[in-house]
Amino acid sequence: MGDEAQGHLKSKALRQRIPIRCQLDTFDVEQCGEYINHRLRVAGQPNPLFTDEAIAKVATASQGAPRAVNNICDLCLFLGASRNLPKVDGEVVDVVTQEIAGSLI
């Protein structure tokens, strides 16, 4: 957790509103792919929708942070669907990460 977030958690009022706190380790590329495919399966998609190149780019752009992985993947799925793509490829991840440029990651 970043210093800013830690500072906020020192506030008694904020701590009372957050019932559970945990820190997740970041994912490496392989774990990122497993996480993305797991989330897709839970959502009802049995087949992988991200190419290996796309997964590697998501892992790099997100620095393996689960929340950033989720945000990037959500936007990639929207863009891929709008382009009627069968899978999210590296180019889609490039477009998304250039567009958000740190705002959601």
Image (cartoon, rainbow, N blue to C red):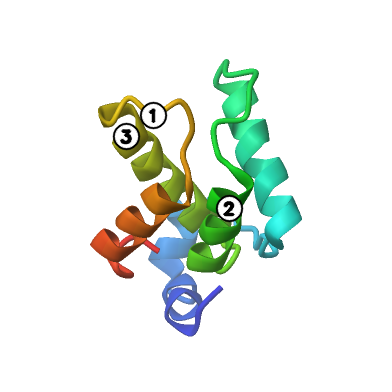
Report the Cα–Cα distance between label 3 and label 2: 18 Å
Rendered residue at 53%/50% (across/down): 54
Of pointers 3 and 1, the one earlier in the residue sequence: 3
Q: Amino acid at mark 3?
A: Phe
Of pointers 1 and 2, the one earlier in the residue sequence: 2
On the question of residue 79 being in view, the answer is yes
Label 2 neighbour load within 10 Å: few <14, some 14-19, many 20+: some
- Find numbered disc 3 in the image and state the secondary structure of the residue it sits on: helix
Q: Residue furthest bottom?
A: 3
Rendered residue at 40%/52% (across/down): 91
Is 13 above or below relative to 30?
below
Query: Which of 73/103 is in front?
Result: 73
- Find numbered disc 1 in the image and state the secondary structure of the residue it sits on: loop
Label 3 neighbour load within 10 Å: few <14, some 14-19, many 20+: some
Is 80 on the left or on the right of 12, as rendered? left
Mark number for residue 85?
1
Is 82 on the left or on the right of 41, as rendered? left
Q: Which residue is mark 3?
A: 78
Rendered residue at 30%/38% (across/down): 79
Judge depth for marks 3 and 1 and give the one in front: 1
Q: Which residue is mark 2?
A: 53
Report the Cα–Cα distance between label 3 and label 1: 10 Å
Q: Amino acid at mark 1?
A: Leu
Residue 100 point in image, percent of width and height: 27, 61
Query: Which of 1/58 is in front?
Result: 58
Quadrant the N terminus occupies: bottom right
Residue 16 point in image, percent of width and height: 47, 57
